[in-house]
Image (cartoon, rainbow, N blue to C red):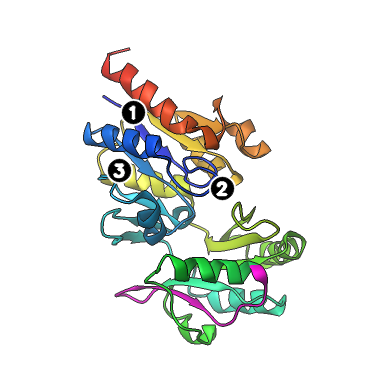
Amino acid sequence: MHPLYISDLDGTLLDTQAKLTPFAFNTLKSLLLEKVPITIASARSAVSMKLLLGELPIQLPVITFNGSCIDRFDTGEHIRIFDVDAGFKHEIYACVCSEGFAPFVSAFDGKRDNLYYEQTINAGMEWYLANRVEVKDHRLRNPVRLISVLDEFIISINVIGKRDALKVLQNELTTHYNEFVQLHLFDNLYSPGWSWLTIHDCKATKDQAIKEMMIMEGLYDHELVAFGDNDNDIAMFELADRAVAVANSSPGALAAADEVIGPHDQDSVVKYLLKDARLKAAGA
C-alpha cells in the first residue's frame, strides 16, 4: 500500500516561476495514472491550482485556502467550507479597514465563487489584480463595496502590504479575535517587497482539512507523507507520519520536519516522490 502524499505548492512543488517543470508534470502524471495517492494542500484556490497544474489526473480532493476548503480538483466543487465566523466577519473587516488596508475577499455565494475588491491602494495589490486578469480567473468581480458582500460565505480575506504594517494589523487581530481566526503572514515570492496577511476561520487549517479528507476517502490507515516550506505547513507536518521540508523552507518548517531535501527549484519533491513510490512498489 502506497503512503498518502500531500504537497504544498508555492516554494515546495512549483519552481521559481510558479510552474511545474516538464519533468515534474510528466512524472506526477505517470505516478497518478499508476494510482499513487497524491494530492495538494495549498493557500491557493482550486481555480488557481487548476490553472497551474493543468490536466494532472488528481482524483483525491485538494485542500485549498490553507484548509478553508476541501475541493474537487477537476471541477473546483466545494466538498467542505470552513468560512469565517459569521458573528465576527464584519468586525474583522472593519479592523482591516481601520488600519488603512483595502483587502481582496474570496467568498462563495451558494452558487459560485467570487473574488471581490473595492480598490487597489498599492503596487502589491495591482500586481495581484493584473495576475488574476491575465489568467482569466473567473472568480474576479468588478469593484464593489465590500461591506455589501460580507453576508456570503467568506473563505479568505487577503490583505496585501508592507510586512511591518501587516505585522501591526496581525497583532491587532490576534489581540481581539485570536480564538476565531487563523492568520498567515508571508512574503509574496513572485512580487518582491510585498507581503500578504491572509485571514481564515479558526477551523481552517491544513491538518484539520487533511484529517477530514482522509476519513472521507477511507485513507485514515495510510502513512501520511507531507511536503512543505513555510510556517503554514507546520500543523500539517505535526500531523504527518513523515514531514518533509525543502531546503529553502522557513526556520519553523525546517525545525518541524523529519527530513530535509533539496530546494524547490530542483524538482526535489517530485524526485523524492518518484524514488519513494518506486521503493514502495518494489516492496521495500
Q: Quadrant of residue 194?
A: bottom right
Whether 43 is among the magenta residues is no
- Label ID, residue 3: 1
Q: Residue at x 52, y 59 (%)?
A: 202
- Rendered location of residue 41, percent (x, y): 43, 47
Q: Quick one: 251 or 11, which is closer to the camera?
A: 11
Q: Secondary structure at mark 1?
A: loop
Classify the position of the N terminus by image quarter: top left
Q: Amino acid at mark 2?
A: Asn
Check contact, mark 3 vs mark 1: CB within 8 A.
Answer: no
Mark positioned earlier in the residue sequence (3 or 1): 1
Q: Residues within 10 Å of mark 2 (few under 14, many from 20)?
A: many
- What is the spatial separation of the Cα atoms under label 3 and label 1, in whole angstroms? 15 Å
Label 3 sits on residue? 215
Q: Secondary structure at mark 2?
A: helix
Mark 2 or mark 3, whichever is nearer to me: 2
Looking at the image, can residue 133 be seen?
Answer: yes
Q: Residues within 10 Å of mark 1 (few under 14, many from 20)?
A: some
